[in-house]
């Protein structure tokens, strides 16, 4: 992070491209010291994204890493050297990574099935913790985490970061702050994308390690549905299948068992109805939310089709009929931010974690929101498996969860 402000904001760039300048020659590119140091548990795909973003944002620096895979550490070391001159510290145990007196916080970026056990160790440190989504693979474990969080005096932020993508940030502003559509009645989200990517030990191809597609991937969208509905889900119905991807795929003798497509409907306590449509064998990334209220309609979409032709990357429509002005726009962040990962969502999630470490209130995802995103995801998986409509109260009771 530069010491210079542009329009009152600190300009973020700390990469090695200006290494030819001496320290005393730097002003615009002089690096201000980070406010916080954190340890990174798990340096795979998203761990490295957090590492790059942390270095670029500059508020937080990665003090050390812990990972059970030698190759992940080797590659993280190489990537770290590309973005900073700082020493790369590797801890030899999870306990060492969590209890280093030099650190101010902990980031947990390991596969879903490890989250609860790692959190049990991390929480003993009493330090602010960021933990990737989904909180857990099973609803019972997610509930245990909500109980742990209630007793925890420090920060526990969950990585439900899509609320920071520019399209959703703008839709939240229009629908919840500006009330551009009046009272929300219907919400529809669609995600069409390429199949799940490769992971260390291919954990995301197996429901027992990921929680199933509707928990692992779709908790992001269920968090958004819950947020736009501003209410608790009461009923979930879903159909889905593994129709195309990873059929016959085996890893270490286990067969992949995850959904690649689904339709989910959710009914909320306040009468809002929501739908979610997933296709994971589309040759693109396309996501779209449509929110209809009694005074208007908002649609926001984000597209990447790998094609050569020029087309919109984001679009947004706010149509308010006779009630107030309508508009169309292309929400975006500066390119440096969008290119840093998940179209800028990771960047703002990171800033939120730094703000939380500084004692500020943020709109980042809470453990409670993490829990309710898993309630919808688990109920949807259950509905696909049983063919039944899932009543949320009964579903929670069947898991021994009494709220
Ligand atoms: N946008 C997002 O919000 C987003 C995107 C991708 C992944 N994620 C989440 O981040 C987490 C990690 O996903 P990923 O894509 O980086 O997976 P990955 O397989 O690429 O990386 C996971 C890393 O964790 C390490 N690891 C596994 N078990 C460990 C343990 N017990 N202790 C320490 N290290 C361990 C692995 O060796 C690997 O390096 C998952 O929970 C996933 O759902 C979130």
Image (cartoon, rainbow, N blue to C red):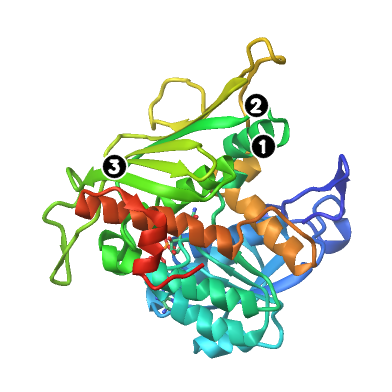
Q: Which label sits in the foreground, 1 or 3?
A: 1
Query: Does the numbered disc 2 mark a residue whose Cβ is under 8 Å from ligand 1?
Result: no
Within the image, what quadrant is residue 202 found in? bottom left
For label 2, the residue is: 182
Residue 256 image position (x, y, % from top left): 19, 60
Within the image, what quadrant is residue 203 found in? bottom left
Q: Are marks 2 and 1 in contact (CB under 8 Å)?
A: no
Q: Earlier in the sequence, mark 2 or mark 1?
A: 1
Q: Please give left or right for residue 270 compared with residue 68 in the image.
A: right
Q: Residue at x 56, y 52 (%)?
A: 161
For label 1, the residue is: 176
Q: Which label sits in the foreground, 2 or 1?
A: 2
Q: Which label sits in the foreground, 3 or 2?
A: 2
Q: Earlier in the sequence, mark 1 or mark 3?
A: 1
Quarter of the rendering occupied by the N terminus = bottom right
301 or 222: which is nearer to us?
A: 222
Label 2: how many Cα within 10 Å (few below 14, some 14–19, many 20+):
some
Q: Would residue 137 be visible to someone looking at this image?
A: no
């Amino acid at each position: 992070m530069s010491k210079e402000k542009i329009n009152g904001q600190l300009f973020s760039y700390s990469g090695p491209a200006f290494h030819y300048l001496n320290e005393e020659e730097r002003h615009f590119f002089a690096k201000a010291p980070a406010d916080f140091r954190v340890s990174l548990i798990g340096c795979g795909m998203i761990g490295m994204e957090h590492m790059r973003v942390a270095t670029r944002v500059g508020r937080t620096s990665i003090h050390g890493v812990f990972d059970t895979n030698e190759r992940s550490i080797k590659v993280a070391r190489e990537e770290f050297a590309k973005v900073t001159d700082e020493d790369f510290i590797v801890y030899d145990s999870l306990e060492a990574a969590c209890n280093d007196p030099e650190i101010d916080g902990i980031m947990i970026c390991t596969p879903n099935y490890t989250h609860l056990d790692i959190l049990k160790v991390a929480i003993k440190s009493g330090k602010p913790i960021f933990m990737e989504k989904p909180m857990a693979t099973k609803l019972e474990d997610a509930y245990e985490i909500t109980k742990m969080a209630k007793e925890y005096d420090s920060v526990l932020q969950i990585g439900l970061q899509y609320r920071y993508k520019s399209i959703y940030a703008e839709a939240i502003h229009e629908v919840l702050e500006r009330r551009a559509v009046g009272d929300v009645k219907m919400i529809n989200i669609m995600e069409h994308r390429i199949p799940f990517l490769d992971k260390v030990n291919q954990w995301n191809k197996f429901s027992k390690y990921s929680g199933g597609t509707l928990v692992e991937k779709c908790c992001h969208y269920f968090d958004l549905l819950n947020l736009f509905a501003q209410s608790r889900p009461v009923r979930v119905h879903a159909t889905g299948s593994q129709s195309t991807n990873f059929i016959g795929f085996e890893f270490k003798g286990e067969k992949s068992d995850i959904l690649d497509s689904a339709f989910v409907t959710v009914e909320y306590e306040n009468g809002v109805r929501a739908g979610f449509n997933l296709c994971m064998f589309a040759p693109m990334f396309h996501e779209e939310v449509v929110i209809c209220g009694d005074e208007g309609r908002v649609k926001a979409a984000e597209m990447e089709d790998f094609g050569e032709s020029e087309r919109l990357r984001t679009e947004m429509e706010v149509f308010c009929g006779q009630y107030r002005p309508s508009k169309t726009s292309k929400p975006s962040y500066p390119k440096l931010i969008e290119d840093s990962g998940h179209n800028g969502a990771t960047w703002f999630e990171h800033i939120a974690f730094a703000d939380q470490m500084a004692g500020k209130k943020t709109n980042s995802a809470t453990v409670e929101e993490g829990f309710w995103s898993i309630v919808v995801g688990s109920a949807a998986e259950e509905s696909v498996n049983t063919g039944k409509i899932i009543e949320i109260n009964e579903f929670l009771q069947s898991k021994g969860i009494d709220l």
